[in-house]
C-alpha cells in the first residue's frame, strides 16, 4: 500500500466528487455540521450504485457523546444489517463506557452485525482514556483501522501522538489521520507521522440559493441555510500531493 485517501462525504453526490478527485474510499454520513450521523438507506444505495469506490458507512444514531443505550445499540445493529444488504464495503463506529473506556458489549454487537466486513473505530478514540492501551484493544478486537486526530483538537496539535500510534501499530491496524486534514497540511502530516492513511471532509460551504428567506428562523446547525459539500478542488489537490509524496 502506497497510501490511502478517504473522504468523508455527506451525500451520494459527494461520493462521486471524491472518486473524481482521486480518493480510494468514502465514509458516507449525514449532517456533517454536527459531526456526522448515519445516512439514509437511499443515500447509501445511491453511493454504492454511482461509484466504484469502497463505501464505508458511519454508524452513529445521533449527535453528542459515544455512550449508547441498549436501544441505540440495537438501532445501530439494524442499520448495519440493512446497509450490508445494499453492498457497502465497511463500517465506521465506536462506543465508550461512562468512564471513557472501550465498551466491549456494545462494540462486540456492532462487530458481529458487520459480519466480517472491515470496521474502523472512529474518533470516539480521541475522547477515550489511555489511547495507547485502547489501540491494543482495537487490534485484539479485530478493527481494521482507527480514525484519530492524535487525541487533540486537530491533527496539527496531535502530531506527536499520531506518530507514536503509527509506530506502535506496526502494521497490525491502520492508523488513519483525521480531524482537520487539509491539502495545506497533508504532506507535513505524512512526513512527520510516517502514516499512510488520511481522512478528511475536504469540504466547502455553498450558500443557500433561496431568493426569499426568513432569517430570524433558525433551522439547524447552519442557520443561514448554507450547505457543506465535497470540494473537487480540495480532494484533487490532496490526492495529487500524496501521489507525489509517496511516489
Image: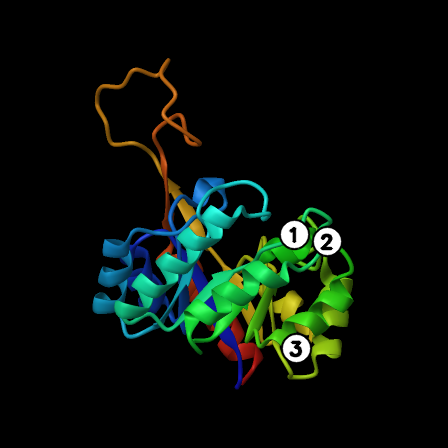
Q: Earlier in the sequence, mark 2 or mark 3?
A: 3
Residue 32: % across, % down: 44, 45
Q: CA distance from mark 1 to mark 2?
A: 6 Å
Q: Quadrant of residue 182?
A: bottom right
Left or right: 65 in relation to 117: right
Q: Quick check: marks 2 and 3 in contact, CB under 8 Å?
A: no
What residue sits right under mark 3 in the picture? Answer: 140
Q: Is residue 192 in sight in this rendering?
A: no
Q: Comparing marks 2 and 3, which lies closer to the viewer?
A: 3
Count neighbours of disc 3 (C-alpha within 10 A) and say few if under 14, some if 14 to 19, many if 20 or more: few
Query: Label 1's element?
Result: loop
Q: Is residue 212 above or below residue 46?
A: above
| Residue lying at 30% horizontally and 15% vertically, measured from the top left | 214
Residue at the disc numbered 2: 157
Residue 29 as seen in the image, left or right of residue 44 = right
Number of numbered discs overlaid on the protein picture: 3
Q: In screen coordinates, is 99 left or right of 90?
A: right
Residue 2, given in percent of the width and then of the height, sits at: 53, 84
Q: CA distance from mark 1 to mark 3?
A: 27 Å
Mark 2 element type: loop
Is 110 or 138 nearer to us in this picture?
Answer: 110
Q: Disc number at residue 154?
A: 1
The answer to whether mark 1 and mark 2 are in CB contact below 8 A is yes
Question: Residue sitting at 66 percent across and 51 percent down?
Answer: 97
Point out the tag, 1 or 3, that comes first from the N-terminus.
3
Residue 221 visible in the snapshot: yes
In the image, residue 217 lies at what x, y percent?
A: 35, 16
Question: What is the crowding at mark 2: few (fewer than 14 residues within 10 Å), some, or many (at least 20)?
Answer: some
Amino acid at each position: 500500500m502506497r497510501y490511502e485517501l478517504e473522504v468523508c462525504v455527506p451525500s451520494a453526490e459527494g461520493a462521486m466528487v471524491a472518486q473524481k478527485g482521486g480518493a480510494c474510499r468514502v465514509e458516507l454520513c449525514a449532517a456533517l455540521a454536527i459531526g456526522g450521523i448515519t445516512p439514509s438507506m437511499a443515500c447509501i444505495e445511491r453511493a454504492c450504485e454511482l461509484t466504484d469506490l469502497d463505501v464505508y458507512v458511519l454508524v452513529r444514531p445521533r449527535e453528542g457523546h459515544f455512550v449508547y443505550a441498549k436501544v441505540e445499540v440495537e438501532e445501530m445493529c439494524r442499520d448495519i444489517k440493512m446497509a450490508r444488504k445494499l453492498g457497502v464495503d465497511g463500517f465506521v463506529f465506536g462506543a465508550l463506557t461512562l468512564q471513557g473506556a472501550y465498551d466491549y458489549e456494545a462494540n462486540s454487537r456492532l462487530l458481529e452485525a458487520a459480519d466480517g466486513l472491515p470496521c474502523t473505530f472512529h474518533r470516539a478514540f480521541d475522547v477515550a482514556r489511555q489511547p495507547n492501551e485502547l489501540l491494543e484493544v482495537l487490534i485484539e478486537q479485530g478493527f481494521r483501522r482507527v480514525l484519530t486526530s492524535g487525541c487533540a483538537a486537530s491533527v496539527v496539535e496531535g502530531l506527536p501522538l499520531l506518530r507514536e500510534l503509527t509506530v506502535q501499530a506496526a502494521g497490525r491496524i491502520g492508523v488513519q489521520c483525521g480531524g482537520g486534514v487539509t491539502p495545506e497540511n497533508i504532506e507535513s502530516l505524512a512526513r512527520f507521522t510516517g502514516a499512510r492513511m488520511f481522512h478528511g471532509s475536504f469540504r466547502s460551504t455553498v450558500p443557500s440559493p433561496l431568493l426569499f428567506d426568513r432569517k430570524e428562523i433558525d433551522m439547524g446547525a447552519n442557520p443561514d441555510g448554507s450547505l457543506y459539500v465535497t470540494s473537487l478542488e480540495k480532494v484533487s489537490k490532496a490526492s495529487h500531493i500524496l501521489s507525489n509524496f509517496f511516489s
